[in-house]
Image (tube, rainbow, N blue to C red):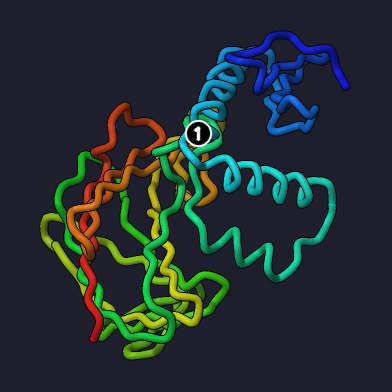
Amino acid sequence: MPQFWSCVGDDPFHIGCTGQTVYVFDKAGTDMTKFKDLFYIGKAKAMCYILENNYSNGYQEEIAYRFALRKKVTGGVKLSKEERLWLETHKEFSQIYGVPILKTDVITLEKGKNYQFDVTFVESLHPGKIYPWFKAPSGMGSILTDVELTDYRGKKSIGKPVKLLATEISAENRSFRFSYSSDCGVLSVGFFCEFYDQKQHLHTGGFSSGAEGLYMLREDMGPSCVLYRCKSRNADTFDSLVFSVEWKMI
């Protein structure tokens, strides 16, 4: 184990540096996360603070388990069906900022029941394309809408159940509706965003579930209504896209 560079709090986490890699360890010596440049020492310190506070707020098991599963994948170990399902059916928080900054959210429902969802645009300050997406985790559900959909191959369809739905909303196209039923009782929520990649000097895009710098905040407006505030990579605030999701059993 590398020599620790520093520690934070009551010795729950440690920062270790070897060459140009910064490591974050727990007190048992488990490699929790790492950054590939000494520039990120400050970020690693912040990570320790976030982990420490999340542990005290009851997120310790979930955060530690997600780290452990990711470490298995990077180590070349194939995840079990149950482990893959767990990753897709739980909220994913930012590795850098922690709770409450989300990469993807989940809405919990009753298994096998049919629901109607209404998605409504509130505002957007993003100059490019940005829109929400909804997914049936591990394909264990069906999304149905009466609007024409186009898949990634360019094929169009109407009234055909899908596992992933991404639809543009704006001031001109303020809302859309879909129905959903799930065998696992969960609907995943995130967003897609076009942005300028300053490192590669090109315009590109990505999903919040995978692209760096795309984050969400969730605000519960009622038992069956959520407001999402989204941040694009080049924005400083969570108003790149704001939209609400409301649902009811049908």
Residue at the extreme right: 1
Q: Residue at x 75, y 67 (%)?
A: 80
Q: Position of residue 160 (x, y in %)?
A: 39, 89
Q: Specify whether residue 10 is in view.
A: yes
Q: Position of residue 11 (x, y in %)?
A: 66, 16
164 is higher (above) or lower (below) than 7: below
Residue at the extreme bottom: 159
Q: Specify whether residue 201 is in view.
A: no
Q: Secondary structure at mark 1?
A: helix
Q: Position of residue 42 (x, y in %)?
A: 57, 13
Quadrant position of the C terminus in the picture: bottom left
Residue pointed to by mark 1 = 54
Q: Residue 154 occupies which quadrant of the picture?
A: bottom left
Q: Nearer the viewer, residue 64 or 174?
A: 64
Q: Residue at x 37, y 87 (%)?
A: 157
> Relative to residue 160, is residue 94 drawn left or right?
right
Q: Residue at x 75, y 16 (%)?
A: 16
> Relative to residue 99, is residue 64 drawn left or right?
right
Q: Nearer the viewer, residue 126 or 4?
A: 4
